[in-house]
Image (tube, grey):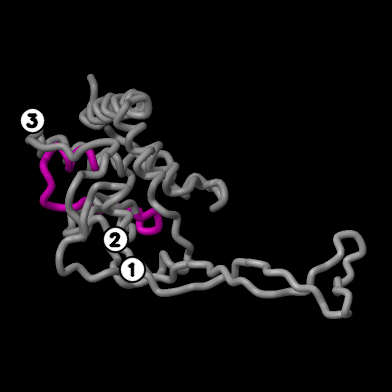
Amino acid sequence: MISKADDNQEKIQTLLKTVEDGIKVVFESERYKKYLSTMSKFHDYSFRNIFLILSQKPDATRVAGFVAWQEKFGRSVCKGEKGISIIGYAPKKITEEVPKKDPITGRSLTDATGKAITESVTKQIPYFKQVYVFDVSQTEGEPLPAIVEDLSGNVKGYENLVTALKDISVFSIHFEDIQGNVKGRCDYMEKKITIKQGMSEAQTVKTIIHEITHTDLHSPSLNLTMKEITDRQTKEVEALCP
């Protein structure tokens, strides 16, 4: 006789197998190629500017300059939106007269009267100034491509399925009002999974399975060192649930 726990585990394994098979399909799709192409257009910000961005807009996800949103992504900054102030690198070119050197000896050249011969040299010097960027949530226009879309609709036996997921999860599962675009979080220290409340039943089940997969793949309780624990982007790819 199959126990309830074994039955639940078998169902979850079937769902996780669907996730595994789906990852390959997603990575080979045109949608994924378009996603990578678009994401490559976003500038990589320094740690200093990332700190400035998050200190002013903690829920920021994708940021770009006013013109970049228009020219690269077909989007416009919404009227009345306040820019996020960061430090921009804008090197300047200056031209100055310098003594002309003999290319062989390196000595300064002079004319017949003994006066130093000079030449104009243009060089670039570092220069920084305050610039403004805007988060995607502050813009409107062409949608950015996504690897997967949010799910909608109800799930047959939803309550029982959520209960089963809670039973087999080694981390406790809680529902909270998470702000921004984050749908779920996995706290390895507290062994807690937090799911955004108010989502569709289908999206909620997807997110729970996604976070449970994180606990299976990346829990520090497996006695791994921090260097051996994969980075966040790799974790998200491995836990991807299409």
Residue at (29, 25) in percent of width and height: 18
The answer to if 192 sits in the magenta stretch is yes
Q: Are the two marked residues, 1 and 2, in contact with CB atoms closer than 8 angstroms?
A: yes
- Residue that mark 1 sits on: 132
> Which of pointers 1 and 3 lies earlier in the amino acid sequence?
1
Measuring from the top left, give residue 175's x and y in whole percent: 18, 54
Q: Tell me the quarter of the image containing the N terminus.
A: top left
Element marked by disc 3: loop
The amino acid marked with disc number 3 is Lys
Q: Residue at x 29, y 40 (%)?
A: 210
Q: Is residue 33 left or right of residue 201?
A: right
**Res 206 quadrant in image:** top left
Disc 1 versus disc 2: distance between alpha carbons? 8 Å
Q: Earlier in the sequence, mark 3 or mark 2?
A: 2
Residue 189 sits in which quadrant? Answer: bottom left
Q: How many marks?
A: 3
Which label is found at residue 171? none
Asked if the stretch drawn in magenta spans residue 139, the answer is: no
- In terms of sequence position, does the residue under pointer 1 or pointer 2 come before the other? 2
Q: Which residue is mark 3?
A: 156
* Residue under the point 49% across and 73% down: 128
| For residue 35, side relative to residue 219 (left or right) | left
Q: Judging from the image, what secondary structure is the residue with disc 2 in? A: helix
Residue beneath disc 2: 66
Q: Amino acid under label 2?
A: Phe
Task: Check the image and report above or below for 88 versus 235.
Answer: below
Give percent across and percent down for residue 64: 33, 57
63 or 219: nearer the eye? 63
What residue occupies the far front of the structure in this picture? 112
Which residue lies at the image location 44% right of the left edge and 60% below the top edge? 45
Q: Secondary structure at mark 1?
A: strand
Q: Which residues are magenta?
A: 187-207
